[in-house]
Each structure stands twice: as structure tokens, then as C-alpha cells.
Amino acid sequence: MSKKEDKKNKAHQPAEPEKEKAAPAPEAEPEKAAEEAAPAPTEAEKLQASLAEANDKYLRMLAEYDNYRRRSAKERENIYADVRADTVKKFLPVYDNLARAAQHETDDETKKGVEGILNQFKTILEGLGVTEIETVGKKFDANLHDALLHIEDEKYGEGEIVLELEKGFKLGDKVIRFAKVQVAN
């Protein structure tokens, strides 16, 4: 056969499959490509990255400290309010006794003295932020009142408080002592 015929025969014959080359590990290939493609970082770029990392750590630490400070202040306020409420609660029986004494005293001079002490007590409570819970004529509210008695009387509305048995007090929005009341209908 001539060279021309030999070439034609090779062209018509199916090509022999090439032997598979051993491929490098898939993980190593992108790393090599990235290393070859990107130039090595300069000293300035390394310092910039280090500075950015340190700045990020600083900002995170500053945010954590700010959150800690706010949380601690809120906890202190709550503890202070609880202690104040507990202290006032211990003085309320004295208030009740003074109020009873002012109602039942027959001697005018003694009655004036007891009422003066009671008014002074009320002023101190108001200064501490303690307020009385309104009762008679108001609608019963389970968040403020404790119903001890119930009467059926058509001259009063549904759930209306007709009698206050013991005063209730609040410190801000927190109830220190529920008002004990009688409710109609």
C-alpha cells in the first residue's frame, strides 16, 4: 500500500481511545489555580487585612459591652423597683390602722392629729410614686381589684364596685396590693 492509501484507511478506522490520564485530586486543582491566578499579597495588603480583622473584633466587643451595660442597668432598675415595692408593702398595715383610727376617733384634737399623720403618710407614698387604686363607682378589673363580696342590686351596673373594704396601691404600673372590694350584679 502506498502512503496515500495507508492514510485513507487510518481515516476510516475508528480512533483508538486515549488512555485516561490520572487526574489530580479535585480539591487540589482549584487551590493551585487560585494560587497561580492571584498574585501573592503584598505586605501592605496583609497589614490591611489584619487591621480590618482587628477592627471587626473591636466593634463586636464594643457592641457586646454596650448590650451588657444596658442589660445590667435594666436589671438594677428592676431590683430597685422590687425592693421599693416590698418596702412600701410592709408599711401598708400602718396606713390601714391610721385610716381606721381617723374614721373612728371621736375626740376632735386626736382626730386632727391622726389625720395629719395620715396625710403625711400619703404625701410620702406619693413621693415614692405610690398611687391608690380607684374603686367605688368603677368597673371591676381583676388586674387591680380582689372581689371579696358580691351583691345583687339593680341600682348598680354590671360589675360595678359598690364598697371598698381595703385600699389597693400601685407603684407605677405594678400592683403592690390589690384593692379588696364588694361588686354588684
Image (tube, helix red, strand yellow):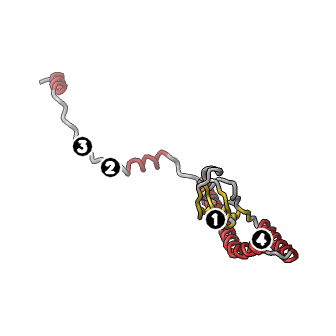
Question: Does residue 6 appear to the left or right of 22 in the view shown?
Answer: left
Q: CA distance from mark 2 to mark 4?
A: 100 Å
Question: Disc 2 or disc 1, which is closer to the eye?
Answer: 1
Name the disc covering residue 20, or none.
3
Which one is in front in this view, the residue at disc 1 or the one at disc 4? Answer: 4
Closer to the chain start, of discs 2 and 4, is 2
Give the SS element for disc 1. Answer: strand
Can residue 84 be seen? yes
Q: Which mark is residue 18?
A: none
Q: Which residue is mark 2?
A: 24
Residue 117 in the image: above or below residue 139: below
Taking the view exactly as shown, the residue that stands out farthest to the right is 109
The three-letter amino acid code for the residue at tag 4 is Gln
Q: Position of residue 64 (x, y in %)?
A: 62, 62
Q: Earlier in the sequence, mark 2 or mark 1?
A: 2
In the image, residue 172 above or below residue 89: above
Q: Nearer the viewer, residue 145 or 37?
A: 145
Residue 147 or residue 53, whichever sits in front: 147
Query: Is label 3 in a helix, a strand or a loop?
Result: loop
Tell me if residue 61 comes above or below residue 95 in the rendering: above
Quadrant in the picture for residue 47: bottom right
Callout 1 touching callout 3 (CB < 8 Å): no
Cα separation, mark 3 vs mark 2, equals 12 Å
Name the image quarter holding residue 123.
bottom right
| Cα distance between the residues tagged 2 and 1 | 85 Å
Could you tell me if the residues under marks 2 and 4 are in contact, i.e. CB atoms within 8 Å? no
Disc with the residue nearer the chain's start (4 vs 3): 3
- The residue lying toward the viewer, choosing from 71 and 158, is 158
Q: Looking at the rendered structure, which numbered label has been put on residue 103? A: 4
Q: Which residue is mark 1?
A: 180
Task: Say which label, 1 or 3, has the lower sequence index.
Answer: 3
